Image (cartoon, rainbow, N blue to C red):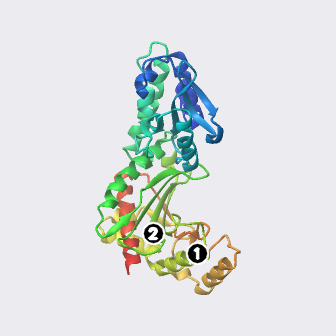
Amino acid sequence: MSADDGLARLLRREETISDLLAFLTQHDPQPLPGLLGLPPGTYEVARERPLGSAARVDLLVLDAEGQPAAVLEIRAGATESGHQRARLEAWAPTSGLPLERLFFVTLARVEAPRGWTSLALGDVFAAWESSPEAGWLAQRIGDELKLWQTQADGRLGELSGWFAPDLLLQRLATELDQRLAAVPATETRRTVAGSTSGGQPQLIAWLRPAGYDGQIWASVELRAQGRAEAGGQPWSLRPCVDATAGPAPTDQILTEVHQSSLHLREHLSFDAVAAHLQVQGRADLAHHLQPGQYGGDLDTFDAAAVTRWYELALGGRRPRLHPFFFHDRGRRMGTQFRLAVHDLDRTDLGDLITIVLQHLSDGLHT
């Protein structure tokens, strides 16, 4: 294994990314004030410092008196933790730390949570590239991050960097927010790019007719079925009905999701999605789709089995498997297709998700 392979392995975890940044600061603290806009002075970085009810913070910057000067939360693949962020926001005023000294560090410079300051991971490590003491390491890290950047702009079949799929999805989320906001007579939510509980890169986007009443959204989830050499592995596309933005699950929400998914079952079918892509001039995208588990074959729809599942769910048993749809605790229901991505790029994925979402939103409107 080469030294570059070893460094690439270190960059596979957010914890070791934070360790590397702390290591650079220990060897040369001079770039830190300029990077974070801090007053001139002497600073050091503490890793995983407990902050009372704020739990542990990835990187805590301390001034010469040992007082908090900044906080850096590193998010490479995982979605931000709303609970952790809220605790840090509550803790900051008690420590005399302005909210703008809370830094949200991601692969791409994404929109930071309100009150936070956004930083791109590449820009953070680039601050040390000219350091006499630590420049050699910062440059090597920068080369790996630039490789991810290049791959995120190319074909998905070329993805090999560990967090390159996450970077691609983060960029795609920003682009989808702009595209979906421009779809006439609809409303959208902020697209989310992050990781599943199993660490798989994932993106979820939403759309529905403007003024639509209730908790229901048309939704599409895109997920890589793995991470190492992600471009060579299958991805999945899940068109679905979604009520995850609403309150805690209730029988009313379960009923609304189930009835809406039944109403949309023809729109959610593989044949309908493929046909709509062809109508929209993207038959090439339809050729990249294949039915997977819960593939939406209407010939297999068993109305009696679906009714039995719903009655059991209302009775509190919440059966794990649905006879036709995949589901997430009854708050999301839909179909699932395999997506061969080798020859696709980020623009193709944006077209695919936008077209499918419009197709589902039109179905909600009828």
Towards the viewer: 51 or 249: 51
Q: Which mark is residue 217?
A: 2
Which corner quadrant holds the C terminus?
bottom left
Decide if residue 1 is in sight here.
Answer: no
Q: CA distance from mark 2 to mark 1?
A: 14 Å
Mark 1 residue type: Leu
Kindly indicate the quadrant of the structure image that contains residue 153: top left
Mark 2 crowd level (few <14, some 14–19, many ≥20, 10 Å Cα): many
Residue drawn at 43 percent across, 46 percent down: 114
Outermost residue on the top side: it is 132
Q: Is residue 288 left or right of residue 291?
A: left
Mark 2 residue type: Trp
Residue 89's spot in the image, x, y percent?
52, 42
Residue 267, relative to residue 142: is it above or below?
A: below
Residue 215's spot in the image, x, y percent?
48, 71
Towards the viewer: 59 or 128: 59
| Residue labelled with disc 1 | 254
Secondary structure found at label 2: strand
